[in-house]
Amino acid sequence: MALRIGFLGAGKMAQAIAKGIISTGMVKADSVIASSPPQDQLYLDFFKDLGCGITHRNEDVVSSSNVVIVAVKPNVMSNVLQSVKNATTSEKLFISVAMGIEIRDIREVLRPSDPKIARVMPNTCVSVGEGACAFVASDDPSADTVTKLFSAVGTCHRLTDESQLDAVTALSGAGPAYVFSIAEALADGGVKMGLPRVLAVNLVSQTILGAAKMIQKTGRHTAVLRDEVTSPGGNTIEGLHFLEKSGMRAALMGAIEASTIKCRVTNMELKEQLKGK
């Protein structure tokens, strides 16, 4: 069955996913449609420029799609799902990329139609075909569709425990922001020591890319790879010693912990909001 993809919400993550899957040829632009409120027309213009269909009616998206990607803020998720209940059938697959709204919560709002449901946590790197995605699905056929869709724009991992998505959100979901900050700092260091800005940025980006590929392709422990770069008494160990004294590893581990806890707190708040509806 040919994929017809609909996006409820046309913001940055929806745009990144759409750009990624269309650029790979997995789906054609004219098989994609997105909806957003009139005040967010600029978001829809992005989809229009890609050659996709656009609408302000959420029902139109669900009616014309067999896979519906729900890419709205968690606090409006319930209202958006309520608006498409009459257009929902059991044959459709809903894929939520919103933080904190569990599969059972989505199913409850969409009753009695009982569609297939999956939750995916991608990151913005899907826009360049290098996303890191993890998901949970309500059944194996849904998992196959999610894997096919998101593997086209990066790596895709199925989880057995939905609660693990909080840590995924903190690690790979927010991870690009951490890496961009590290890249900026490294480039600033190069500039401080006399390198031109453009050269420093190019060296840093290629170094990060190359190191990542070494981790993926060799399968060796990161500590082993690090040690191979670290000669006795050399400049690398000098730099590593400075990072250790500055608490770099503890800071990065703490960032993942803090972000995961934030996700869990937000999840609890969203559950309370849903109970109040």
Image (cartoon, helix red, strand yellow):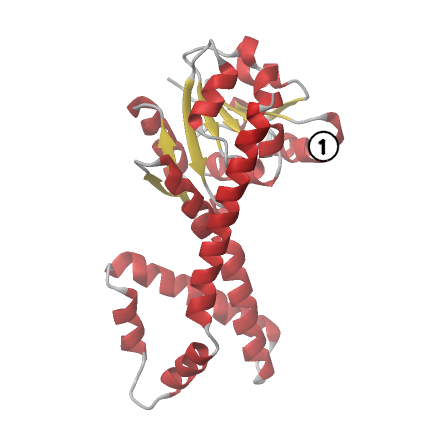
Q: Which residue is mark 1?
A: 40
* Residue sitting at x 54%, y 16%: 62
Q: Quadrant of the N terminus?
A: top left
The x and y percentages for residue 245 are 45, 80
Q: How many marks?
A: 1
On screen, residue 21 versus residue 135, left or right, reads: right
On screen, residue 252 versus residue 181, left or right, reads: left
Work out whether residue 15 or residue 239 is closer to the camera in this orientation and state it.
239
Q: Secondary structure at mark 1?
A: helix
* Residue sitting at x 40%, y 86%: 238
Q: Quadrant of residue 206?
A: bottom left
* Residue sitting at x 46%, y 71%: 248
The x and y percentages for residue 116 are 40, 19
The x and y percentages for residue 2 are 41, 20
Tell me the kind of residue under disc 1: Asp
Q: Does residue 49 appear in the picture of this structure? A: yes
Q: Quadrant of the C terminus?
A: top right
